[in-house]
Amino acid sequence: MTSKVDVTTLSDLLRRAAKAEILPRFRRLGSGDVRAKSEATDLVTEADEQAERMIKAEAAKLWPDALFIGEESVAADPALLDRLEGADLAIIVDPVDGTFNFASGIPAFGVMAAVVSKGETVAGIIYDPMGDDWVLAEKGGGAWLKRPDGETERLKVAEPVELGQMVGMASTGFFAKEKRAEILANLAKVRFLANYRCAAHEYRAFASGHVHYLSYNKLMPWDHLAGTLISQEAGAYAARFDGSPYLPHHVDGGLLIAPDKASWELLRKEVFTV
């Protein structure tokens, strides 16, 4: 399935923005180039703002009929997010996913974009500026690792394993305190828990078959639309905690992703008991 937005063109735009506005600022941010938003760990940098500005301007020329929703645009105008559900065509962008890592000089950050058509995610792209490659998917076309030289590799999620052998990532910071304590205790049932503070790299690791689960509670579209589609196209089962599909306009209800439905149900019953 192809969208009205050419995925190759959009992928190249993310790369160009990273090279022009993000990488030159990595480990070179001045004291006035980093600001806190909602809390001390929720940061925005000059790189986020300038990269989004470039992507937005170029996208407007290429796809003038598309609604553009960027993380920093919504921070400035929260009502913009309300337009996503009814949009015929939308491009959703996270200019620097993993801003805390980026601002800390940790080379684990990415640039993400999703394309939504009439309420359905039809394309997702995650670009890694440090590795200079993409993982991407169009609905119905599989998930792929692509490099600038044209080399491609099809992605596939890990084979299912028993609960005690599962390794994966979970973000528990947005659960209520008591529920967070319960879930963290439950995570002793799996083999390993990590959190990269960067959904871009967590989704890349999952879709490439390196880990067995991902879980998030707060759902902002720029963080999860691209990665969820890529994971599903790599063979994963994904749903909100109540079992319903994750849709572009959802911002709550949690998200759990596993290699198959049986693994999802096991994790939901034994670990993510929300």
Image (spheres, rainbow, N blue to C red):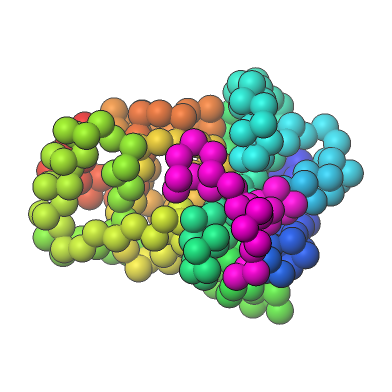
Tell me where residue 218 appears, x and y as whole percent: 40, 36
In the rendered view, tell whether residue 112 sits above or below residue 250. below
Q: Could you tell me which residue is drawn at 58 percent across and 39 percent down?
A: 121
Q: Could you tell me which residue is drawn at 11 percent across and 47 percent down?
A: 185
Q: Is residue 47 left or right of residue 185?
A: right
The stretch of residues the image draws in magenta is 26-51
Tell me where residue 272 appears, x and y as whole percent: 21, 40
In the rendered view, tell whether residue 180 sits above or below residue 51. above
Tell me where residue 78 appears, x and y as whole percent: 61, 25
Quadrant in which the C terminus appears: top left
In the rendered view, tell whether residue 137 sits above or below residue 84. below
Give the mark count: 0
Examine the structure image and report whether residue 49 is included in the region drawn in magenta: yes
Q: Is residue 186 left or right of residue 201?
A: left
Q: Could you tell me which residue is drawn at 29 percent across and 44 percent down?
A: 172
Q: Could you tell me which residue is drawn at 80 percent across and 51 percent down?
A: 54
Q: Quadrant of residue 148?
A: bottom right
Examine the structure image and report whether residue 18 is included in the region drawn in magenta: no
> Which is nearer the eye, 158 or 173?
173
Tell me where residue 255 appears, x and y as whole percent: 36, 39
Q: Is residue 84 visible?
A: no
Q: Quadrant of residue 119?
A: top right
